[in-house]
Amino acid sequence: MRVNRLTAIGAVVLLVAACSSSSTTPTPAATSAAGTPGATSAATTAPSVAAATTITEWDYQSADPQMTQWQKVLDECTASTGITIKRQAIPRDELINKVLLAAQQKQLPNVLRIDNPDLQQVADTGALAPLTDYGVDLSGLYQNLIDAGTYKGKVYGIAPGINGMALFYNKDMFTAAGLKPPTTWAEVTSDAKALTKSGVYGMAFSAPATEEGSWQFEPWLWGAGGDLSKLDSPQAVQALQFWTDLVKSGYTSKSVVQWTQGDVESQFEAGKVAMEQNGVWNLSALEKSKINFGIVPIPQPNGGAAPGPMGGEVLTIPVNPDAAASAAAGKVVNCLLSDKEMAEWATLQAYIPSRQSVAAQAAAADPNMASFVTAAAAERSRTGPPANLGPNYSKVSQPLWTAIQAALSGAKSPQDALTAAQQAASAALAGS
Amino acid sequence: MTRVVEGGAAAKAAVPPSKQSRGLPRWRRERIAGLLFLLPALVYVLAFYAYPIAFNVLMSLEKYTLKTFVTGEAPFIGLDNFKHLVNNPEFWPAVVNTVWFTVGSLFFQFTLGLLIALFYQHKFPLNSILRALILVPWLAPVLVSGAIWVRLFDQDTGVINFAIHSLGYQGQISWLTDPHLSLISVLIANIWIGIPFNMVILYGGLQAIPRVLYEAASIDGASAWQRFRYITWPLLRPVSTVVLLLGLVYTLKVFDVIMSITRGGPADTSQTLNTWAYSLAFTNGFDFGLGAVAGDILLVIVFAFGMLYLRYAYRELRETAS
C-alpha cells in the first residue's frame, strides 16, 4: 500500500520536475549582473559562469539546536569558498525516501549527508562518487572512520565529527549510596540494584525496534567477545542475557524496548534513572543542566573498556553530470573537514572531531570530552571489520534488534531469540 | 495521456458546427458525447488507481531494491518474492495479528457504536452537545491520539495503570512492552478511534426508522428486546452492512495507529500485514518487491470484500425497486 503511494508520488514529482525543468530556461546574463544579488543567487544556476557556483546540500539535522549549528558551519564555508549552498534539512525518517526518488530522477543533491552505517548500502547502488576524485583531504582522520566510509577500496563518505557512547552516572545518587561507578558487568548489576528504588531505575539504555537498538547493544556484544557474523554465539547470548536480567530484575524499565536515546536522556535528566548508556552528543546539554554527572566507559564483563560502534553522519558527493557542481561540492566538503570548521562544529554539537590532532585539542579543553576521545580510536565501524558486512549490515542489524526486543519483552529466551536472529540473518544474506 | 486529452478537446470543438452535426447520425453524436463525459473519470481511474495497482503487482514480481532507484534495473524474478514472504517466520504471525486486529476492531467498534447510538435515541438534556463530544476521537489527528495513548499506557507513569492501582491491583501491567499485550493495546486505541464513525452512521440509520413501527409494536405489547430484535435490527441491516464493510477496509489499512503507538513491537508482536509491508520496503533492507507482495495480499482481501459490498448493494437496490 505504501509502495503504491511512493510510485504515485514518484509520478507526480516526475511531472513537476518535467514542467519546472522546461520553464527555468537560463535568464540572460545581463539581467543577473544588473544587481539584486539575493534574487539572482536563488534563481539562477549560472552554468556559463564557472567561478561562482551554487550547490545543493541535504542532511537530516532538521531539529534545533543541530539544525542551526550545522547551518553556521555551512555559512562559514560559503564565506570562505564563495560557493552558495542551498540546504535542505529533511527529517531523518523521510530522508531516505527523498533520496530514492531523487536518485530515480537523477536529481540528487551535490552534497548528501547520511548516517554512516547506511553509506555502504548507498555506495553499492552506484549513486555516489569517490571523494578522492574531488580532492577531499583524508589525512590524519581516524582509521575506523575511513573504514566506515570505504566501499570496494574507495572512500565515499567522511564525517567531520564522530560520536560514541559511555555510561553516564548521577554522582549525587552514587555518593548518597556510597557506591563507586561500575568497572565490570557484575558491578553494573550490583550498582543498579542498590540504586533502584521507588520512582528511580538503577540503569537505562535504549532498545527500540530500530538501528538504535542494535547500536546500543553492540558495545556489550563486542565487549563479551561476540561478533555480528555470529549472532547466536555464546558470547552474544551472554550479552543479551545480561541486558535481559537487568530488565527482569526490575533495575531497568521494561519500557526500554520503546525508549529512544532521547527518551533515555530525558529520564536521566529528570533524575528517574541513576545510570544511563548514552552518546557523547548529550554532553553540551548535560553540562548546562543541574545534574551532577560522571562518565565511565562501558565495561567488558571482567573489566576494561568495551569497544563501541562508531557513530556519525558522513558527507558524500553523489554522482552528477554537472562536473563544475561536483568540483564545488568537493571544495565545500574540504572546507567542512578543515581543522577550523571541524573543531567549531564538533564543539557546538559535542562530537569528537574526526582528525586526531583536532580531537586531542578538544580533549584538552574539556575533561568530559577527553574520556570519549580516548575511546574513539578503539571504536569500530559497524559495516567494517571484523564482520565486514558492508552493504549487508542492515540485514544483520534488523534481526538483531528484533532478538533484543524479543528477549527484553520476555517473548523468547536470549538463546532462542538469537538463534532465530541468526537464521533470519543467514536467510537474508543468502537472498542477496 | 496528453494525446487522449488533446484528442478529446479536438473532438469537443468539432462537434458543435452544424455542418458536421448534420453529417453524423444522432446516435453517433450521443455516443461521442457519452464517451466525452466518461473521459475525465476514466483518466482519473487509470492514472490514480489502475496504474499504481498494476505497478505494485509488477513490482512484486521483480527484485526491486535500493539499487533499482539508481540503475533503473529491476530483474524479473517471478514468484520468488511470494515464496520469500510466505517462508519468512514473521509472515504468519503478521497475518494472524491482522485477522485479530480487524475482527476485534470491527466487533467492538460496531457493538459499542450501536449501544451509544441507541442511547442517544433517548431525549435528555445536553444530548446534542454530548453527541458532538463523542466525535472527538474521530476528529483528532491519529498521530496526536497515538502519542497520548502512549502516555496513557505507560507502565510507570500512565493513567491507566494508576487507575488499575487505585482499584486495588498491585501488579504493573506493561501494556506496550509485554509481547502478549501489545496487540491488545493498539486494538483498544483503534476501537476508541473507530467508535464515533460507527456511532454517527448507525445513529443516522436509527433516525430513519419510522417511529410509528415502534408505537405499533408497543401497542401490541412488544418488549424492548423484541422491538430491537424485530424492528431495529432488521431495518438497520443495510446501514450495518455498509458500516461493517467500510470499517473492514478502514481497519485493514490502519497504519498510523500502530506506528505511533508500538511501531509493530516489541519484537513484531503488534505487526500487521500493513506495518510489516512498510518495514520490509522502507526500514529493513529496502526490499520493495517483498513489500509489494504484502501490499498485493491486502489488495486482494480488500478487493474481495469490495465486490461483496457491491453485490450486496446491488441486491438491496433491486429489492427496493421491485
Image: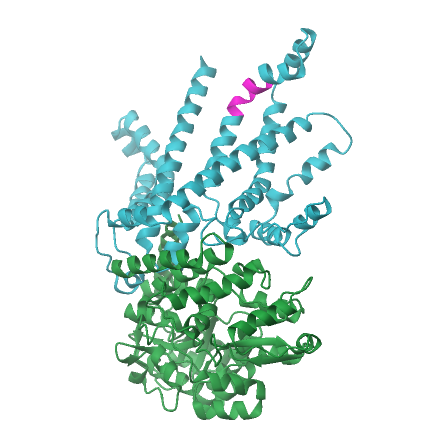
Up/down of B261 relative to A382, above or below? above
The region drawn magenta spans B232-239
Furthest residue to the top?
B220
Residue A194 visible? The answer is yes
Residue A52 visible? The answer is no
Residue B289 point in image, percent of width and height:
30, 52
Front in this rendered view, residue A98 or A355:
A355
Residue name at image x 50 percent, y 65 percent? A243
Front in this rendered view, residue B181 or B114:
B181
Label tally = 0
Task: Give the colour of chain A.
Answer: green
Residue B290 point in image, percent of width and height:
32, 51
Residue A177 point in image, percent of width and height:
69, 74
Mostly what secondary structure, the magenta segment? helix
**Residue B238 highlighted magenta (yes or no):** yes
Task: Give the colour of chain B.
Answer: cyan
Q: For residue B212, which quarter of the picture? A: top right
Up/down of A346 relative to A116, above or below? below
Up/down of A204 relative to B271, above or below? below
Q: Is residue B208 left or right of residue B302?
A: right
Front in this rendered view, residue A35 or B55:
B55
